[in-house]
Image (cartoon, grey):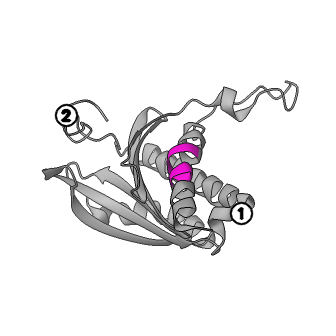
C-alpha cells in the first residue's frame, strides 16, 4: 500500500466510518414483540455527531451528543495505533483523581478489550482557562488494519461501545460532559 493510499484510508476511517458509527452510540430499541431484523441501526440511531478535522491530519475531534449530554472525543489513528481521548470538563471539585474510581468498572472492560487507560488533569486545547480531565485510551490494531475490513469493524465497534458505556457511566454518576459554550466554539466563533 502506498503512503498516499494509507493516508486516504485513515481519512476515510476517521471522517466517514467513525462519524457514522458514533451516530449509533444511542439508538431506539424495537419492542420485544416486534419482528426481528426490521429496524436497522442506521434508522434507529439517536446520536448526533459534529466533527473538527483538518484534511491530512491523523486525528479527528468529535462532539458526540447522546443520552441528553455531549462528549468531546478525539481519535488519533497512526496507521494501526489508536489513541482515543475523552475530554470531561473539570467542574466544581471534579479532577482526574476523583473521576478515576467512578470509572473502574468501565476501565476493566476497556483493558480487557486491549486498551491501556491513562488519566490526567489538563487545560482545554482551545481555552487556556477551562480545566478538563483527559482520559487517554491506547491500543494497537493489527499491522494490516487499513486493508482489513474485519479489523476496521472490530475497532470501530469497540470504540463506539467503549464511548457508549463511558457516557452511560457519567450519566449514572451525574457528571456533565458537555463542554462550555466557549470551549465548544471553533476559531471563527461558530459552534463546532
Residue at the image point whose x is 40% and y is 44% from the top: 71
Quarter containing the N terminus:
bottom right
- Left or right of residue 122: residue 61: right
Residue 80 image offset from top left, x and y in percent: 56, 70
Vertically, is 125 above or below 108? above
Residue 88 image offset from top left, x and y in percent: 32, 51
Q: Is residue 187 something one can see in this rendering?
A: yes
Q: Which residue is mark 2?
A: 188
Dividing the picture into quadrants, the one containing residue 174 is: top left
Q: Which residue is mark 1?
A: 148
> Where does the magenta region start and end?
11-16
Residue at far left of view: 129
Residue at the image point whose x is 40% and y is 49% from the top: 55
Q: Main secondary structure of the magenta part?
A: helix
- Left or right of residue 29: residue 133: left
- How busy is the neighbourhood of tag 2: few (under 14 within 10 Å), some, or many (20 plus)? few
- Left or right of residue 3: residue 121: left
**Which of the two labelled residues, at mark 2 and mark 1, occupies the earlier sequence position?**
1
Label 2 and label 1: CA atoms lie apart by 38 Å
Vertically, is 116 above or below 154? below
- Residue 15 highlighted magenta (yes or no): yes
Amino acid at each position: 500500500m502506498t503512503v498516499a493510499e494509507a493516508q486516504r484510508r485513515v481519512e476515510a476511517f476517521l471522517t466517514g466510518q467513525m462519524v457514522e458509527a458514533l451516530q449509533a452510540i444511542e439508538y431506539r430499541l424495537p419492542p420485544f414483540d416486534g419482528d426481528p431484523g426490521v429496524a436497522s441501526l442506521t434508522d434507529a440511531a439517536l446520536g448526533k455527531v459534529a466533527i473538527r478535522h483538518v484534511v491530512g491530519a491523523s486525528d479527528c475531534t468529535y462532539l458526540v451528543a447522546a443520552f441528553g449530554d455531549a462528549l468531546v472525543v478525539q481519535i488519533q489513528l497512526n496507521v494501526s495505533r489508536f489513541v482515543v481521548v475523552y475530554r470531561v470538563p473539570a467542574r466544581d471539585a471534579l479532577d482526574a483523581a476523583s473521576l478515576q474510581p467512578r470509572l473502574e468498572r468501565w476501565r476493566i472492560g476497556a483493558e480487557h478489550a486491549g486498551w491501556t487507560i491513562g488519566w490526567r488533569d489538563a487545560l482545554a486545547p482551545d481555552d487556556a482557562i477551562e480545566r478538563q480531565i483527559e482520559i487517554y485510551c491506547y491500543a494497537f490494531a493489527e499491522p494490516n488494519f487499513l486493508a482489513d475490513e474485519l479489523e476496521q469493524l472490530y475497532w470501530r465497534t469497540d470504540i463506539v461501545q467503549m464511548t457508549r458505556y463511558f457516557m452511560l457511566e457519567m450519566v449514572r454518576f451525574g457528571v456533565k460532559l458537555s463542554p462550555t459554550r466557549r470551549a465548544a466554539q471553533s476559531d471563527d466563533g461558530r459552534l463546532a
